[in-house]
């Protein structure tokens, strides 16, 4: 057990290769106890929340969700969160390691608005994750519905217990979160495992996240970064109206590009530490934000995310890095790798 995303979670439950195989080609059950839910209430909730985040709120369809960045007035990223809508109810989903800071940031901007933020106690309700291309099969075996589209949600029942089922964003696999009363989470875990989902820990989840090219805040995205530098255009909505930091985002879009981008990488050489410098012909070209060894049947691959300077990327020359006294090379991937 160790800290992961602000909560204590199992690191490994089997050999890494077996866990990665389940995530990439089967189905895996895992802890999501690091997620926090916050209800957004009050007459002004839609207008106020739309002014605080980068993606759509008012046009979010009932039963749908959207990933958002939270910015300051200078357009710098303060964190990320999911917004979910059910009928006229709005709810945030925030990683535990960002919870206190983001809630304080949002609270600061509730001035004359009829808005109230109410957290769901994680001791009362928590979430399990179900990830993999066969996740739908597992849901069917335990009597839960399959969601055909990402970023959708539905309420259902598991053995008489109400649950909230959400399908998130994924590149290489389907990603589900199942919210259930904490007293029943062990029963659900056992049922999913009995149905064929392999239990996996946070180490494999982190490696799979890197393989999918999905950035994590405070690791791959930090406070100094601008939204377009992260290459995560799925978090931006350019016709939703004004929001905090929107002027900077629009200025970048209309007047020119940023000078660096977060990219998926594949490395040849030793596993580097986060922050390892990337170079082209001896000149600094960026840095690695996260990297992981991904054991696969064909051999272990080292995949990474890195912030790359635009001029270095345009030259399309090999990138080099150092790990201790050893060196390696990195190449930019055009998309998520086939595992």
Image (cartoon, helix red, strand yellow):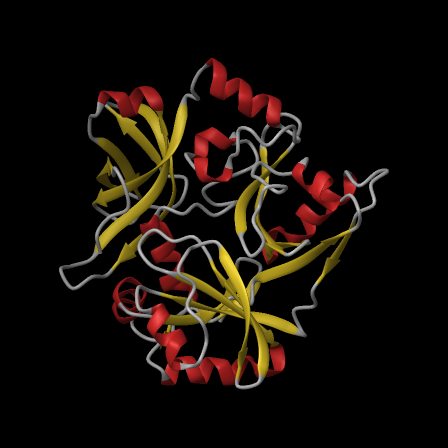
Outermost residue toward the left in this view: 298
**Residue 97: quadrant of the picture:** bottom right
The one of 117 and 105 positioned closer to us in this rendering? 117
In the image, residue 337 sits, relative to residue 255, either above or below, namely: below
The one of 289 and 314 positioned closer to us in this rendering? 314
The one of 307 and 183 positioned closer to us in this rendering? 183
Quadrant assignment for the C terminus: bottom left
Give the percent coordinates (x, y) of residue 291. Answer: 34, 48
Give the percent coordinates (x, y) of residue 332. Answer: 26, 36
**Residue 261: quadrant of the picture:** top left
Horizontal arrangement in the rendering, residue 77 relative to residue 24 (left or right): right
Q: Residue at x 33, y 80 (%)?
A: 196
Q: Residue at x 42, y 81 (%)?
A: 142
Give the percent coordinates (x, y) of residue 312. Answer: 29, 23
Q: Residue at x 20, y 26 (%)?
A: 317
Outermost residue toward the right in this view: 112
């Amino acid at each position: 057990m160790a800290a992961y995303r602000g909560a204590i979670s199992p690191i490994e439950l089997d050999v890494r290769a077996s866990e990665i195989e389940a995530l990439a080609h089967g189905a895996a059950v895992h802890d999501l106890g690091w997620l926090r839910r916050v209800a957004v209430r009050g007459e002004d909730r839609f207008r106020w929340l739309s002014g605080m985040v980068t993606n759509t709120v008012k046009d979010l369809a009932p039963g749908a969700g959207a990933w958002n960045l939270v910015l300051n007035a200078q357009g710098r990223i303060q964190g990320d969160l999911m917004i979910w809508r059910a009928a006229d109810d709005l709810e945030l989903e925030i990683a535990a390691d960002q919870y206190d800071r983001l809630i304080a940031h949002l609270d600061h901007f509730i001035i004359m608005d009829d808005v109230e933020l109410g957290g769901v106690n994680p001791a009362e309700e928590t979430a399990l994750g179900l990830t993999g291309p066969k996740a739908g099969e597992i849901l069917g075996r335990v009597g839960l519905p399959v969601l055909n589209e990402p970023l959708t949600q539905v309420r259902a029942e598991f053995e008489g217990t109400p649950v909230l089922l959400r399908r998130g964003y994924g590149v290489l696999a389907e990603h589900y979160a199942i919210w259930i009363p904490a007293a029943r989470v062990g029963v659900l875990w056992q049922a999913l495992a009995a149905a064929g989902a392999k239990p996996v820990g946070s180490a494999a989840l982190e490696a799979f996240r890197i393989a999918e090219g999905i950035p994590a805040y405070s690791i791959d995205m930090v406070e100094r970064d601008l939204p377009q530098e992260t290459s995560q255009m799925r978090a931006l909505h350019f016709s939703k109206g004004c929001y905090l930091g929107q002027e900077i985002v629009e200025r970048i879009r209309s007047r020119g590009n940023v000078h660096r981008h977060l990219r998926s990488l594949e490395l040849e050489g030793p596993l580097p530490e986060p922050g390892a410098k990337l170079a082209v012909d001896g000149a600094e070209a960026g840095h690695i934000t996260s990297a992981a060894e991904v054991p696969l049947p064909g051999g272990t691959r080292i995949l990474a995310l890195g912030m790359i300077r635009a001029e270095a990327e345009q030259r399309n020359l090999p990138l080099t890095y150092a790990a201790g006294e050893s060196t390696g090379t990195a190449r930019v991937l055009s998309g998520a790798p086939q595992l």
